[in-house]
Image: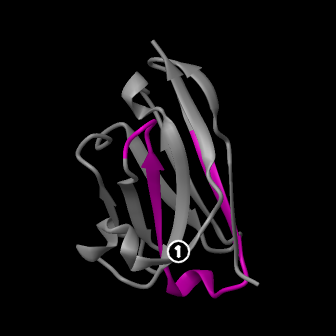
């Protein structure tokens, strides 16, 4: 059974940091693309970052580039999202996802097969 479980969300002041984790099971982690998406309040889901679990190539949305870092630990079957210099506009429900499609299509949620339930990130001003 495929499972993706996010953790690490919470309430933080603007300028603060959070580290999201996504624990996975039920599939061969090292063969997949892992992505982070978010859904701000009353908005559609949007791409945040993606990483190849094989060679560590990454991609970021322009809005988070330079502030967020995606990484993975193949031995632990986990992917992380380090979020620094958080802004109120970073508020949203953050999801991790697993797929097999690389760039540039990995920016589309349709390219992912498995999704977690999400973890809430709230940034206060």
In what element is the residue under mark 1?
strand
| Residue 3 image point, x, y percent | 71, 73
- Location of residue 125 by image quarter: top left
Q: Is residue 53 visible?
A: no
In the foreground, 40 or 29: 40
| Residue 36 image point, x, y percent | 47, 57
In the foreground, 35 or 108: 108
Magenta-colored span:
19-43
Q: Is residue 99 magenta?
A: no
| Residue 27 image point, x, y percent | 66, 86
Q: Is 84 located above or below residue 99 in the figure?
A: above
- Location of residue 104 by image quarter: bottom left
| Residue 96 image point, x, y percent | 55, 61
**Neighbourhood count class around disc 1 (C-alpha, 10 Å): few under 14, some 14–19, many 20 upward:** many
Q: Is residue 38 magenta?
A: yes
Which residue is outermost to the top? 125
């Amino acid at each position: 059974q495929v499972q993706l479980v996010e953790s690490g969300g919470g309430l933080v002041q603007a300028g603060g940091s959070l580290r999201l984790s996504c624990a996975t099971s039920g599939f061969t982690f090292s063969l997949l693309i892992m992505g982070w998406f978010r859904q701000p309040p009353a908005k559609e889901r949007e791409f945040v970052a993606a990483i190849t679990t094989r060679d560590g190539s990454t991609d970021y949305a322009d809005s988070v580039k330079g502030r967020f870092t995606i990484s993975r630990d193949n031995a632990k079957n986990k992917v992380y999202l380090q979020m620094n210099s958080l802004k109120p506009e970073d508020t949203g429900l953050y999801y991790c996802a697993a797929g097999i499609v690389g760039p540039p299509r990995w920016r589309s949620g349709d390219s992912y097969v498995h999704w977690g339930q999400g973890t809430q990130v709230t940034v206060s001003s």
